[in-house]
């Protein structure tokens, strides 16, 4: 037997196996590097979607199903990847399982938790993700941030929807931030600039806004961020410098409800007393001073460090 030719044949066979394995793995991995969903789950989701969703959202997910004309608010266009791709799986699970109202959306979206198991809800989401154009990429999905102690507000306003899904600029609502000390709370009139039409007929949360407008009363929002009275802070200087709102307020575009963990901490104070150097909590003096020093060093800013800048 020719040993050389046998070894050559084995090498060719091994090379073919490597190519076949690479091609198989290539089909299982998405361009973003994430493992692609199993085809069997997507197909199962397709069947569930046809049974429970297509009547309103349409066969291709564009919100044009035969029942859509009966709704005051058109069913969401699930194929518009510009809007749906960044919405977290947790958000979609919540809406499908418990209905639109649980996320401040129209109650026209019913709760399907009584009809679908958790696994089936996930399959529906996998199928809906496959409808999106541009295609869904896992890297685009926003991860929900829940801050403990977020106060209950008089109206369910979701920053995840407004700043996350629709990418509204913070200053669209907080327009005073670029020209005054305060960011400002949007007036009822500003909210109604959109919601005289959007969600006006069938969303109870929007109905609350309209009722405040009819009564000529401001919405009694619960304040979340507040500095001590002895500390002076101006939004204008920071916004004009180009500091992102998230620097101080956190990733609000990923929050359902806004909360904040700020202010002095007894634990931090005790650690400082014994010589340890814990990271200062947000919106404390040490945290602000560290930011000024960092911006001065990295971006060549001229952020002041003298006491009278904030205490006068």
Image (spheres, rainbow, N blue to C red):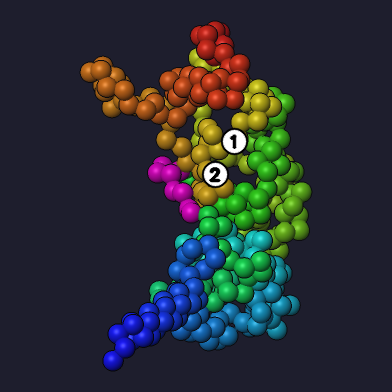
Question: At which x and y percent is residue 167?
Answer: 66, 50
**What's the magenta region?**
143-150
Left or right of 53 in this view: 27: left
Disc 1 target residue: 245
Q: Is residue 217 visible?
A: no
Q: Which residue is mark 2?
A: 252
Question: Residue 252, position in %: x, y?
Answer: 54, 44
Q: Which residue is drawn at the image coordinates 69% and 27% (left, top)?
A: 240
- Taking depth in this image into account, of 303 and 66 the one nearest to the observer is 303
Left or right position of 210 against 144: right
Queried whether the magenta region covers residue 255, the answer comes back as: no
Pointer 2 with pointer 1, Cβ within 8 A: yes
Q: Nearer the viewer, residue 157 or 145?
A: 145
Query: At numbered mark 1, what does the secondary structure look like: helix, strand or loop?
Result: loop
Q: Residues within 10 Å of mark 2 (few under 14, many from 20)?
A: many
In the image, farthest residue toward the front: 2
Does 259 appear above or below 306? below
- Residue closest to the far bottom: 1
The N terminus, quarter of image: bottom left
* Secondary structure mostly seen in the magenta stretch: loop
Judge whether 228 appears above or below 141 on screen: above
């Amino acid at each position: 037997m020719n040993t050389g030719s046998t070894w050559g044949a084995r090498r060719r066979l091994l090379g073919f196996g490597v190519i076949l394995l690479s091609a198989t793995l290539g089909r299982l991995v998405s361009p973003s590097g994430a493992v692609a969903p199993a085809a069997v789950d997507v197909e199962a989701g397709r069947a569930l979607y046809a049974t429970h969703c297509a009547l309103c959202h349409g066969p291709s997910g564009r919100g044009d199903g035969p029942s859509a004309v009966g709704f005051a608010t058109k069913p969401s266009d699930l194929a518009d990847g510009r809007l749906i791709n960044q919405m977290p799986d947790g958000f979609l699970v919540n809406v499908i399982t418990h209905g639109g109202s649980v996320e401040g959306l129209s109650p026209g979206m019913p709760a399907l938790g009584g009809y679908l198991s958790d696994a089936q809800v996930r399959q529906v989401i996998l199928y809906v993700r496959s409808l999106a154009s541009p295609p869904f990429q896992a890297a685009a999905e926003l991860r929900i941030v829940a801050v403990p102690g977020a106060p209950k507000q008089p109206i369910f306003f979701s920053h995840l929807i407004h700043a996350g899904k629709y990418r509204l600029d913070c200053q669209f609502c907080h327009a005073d931030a670029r020209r005054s000390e305060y960011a400002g709370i949007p007036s009822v009139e500003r909210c109604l600039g959109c919601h005289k039409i959007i969600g006006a007929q069938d969303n109870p949360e929007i109905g609350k806004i309209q009722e405040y407008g009819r009564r000529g009363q401001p919405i009694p929002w619960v304040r979340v961020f507040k500095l001590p009275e002895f500390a002076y802070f101006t939004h204008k200087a920071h916004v004009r410098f180009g500091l992102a709102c998230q620097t101080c307020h956190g990733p609000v575009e990923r929050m359902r409800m806004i909360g904040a963990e700020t202010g002095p901490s007894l634990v931090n104070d005790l650690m400082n007393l014994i010589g340890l150097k814990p990271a200062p909590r947000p919106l404390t003096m040490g945290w602000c001073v560290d930011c000024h020093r960092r911006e001065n060093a990295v971006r060549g800013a001229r952020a002041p460090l003298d006491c009278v800048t904030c205490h006068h």
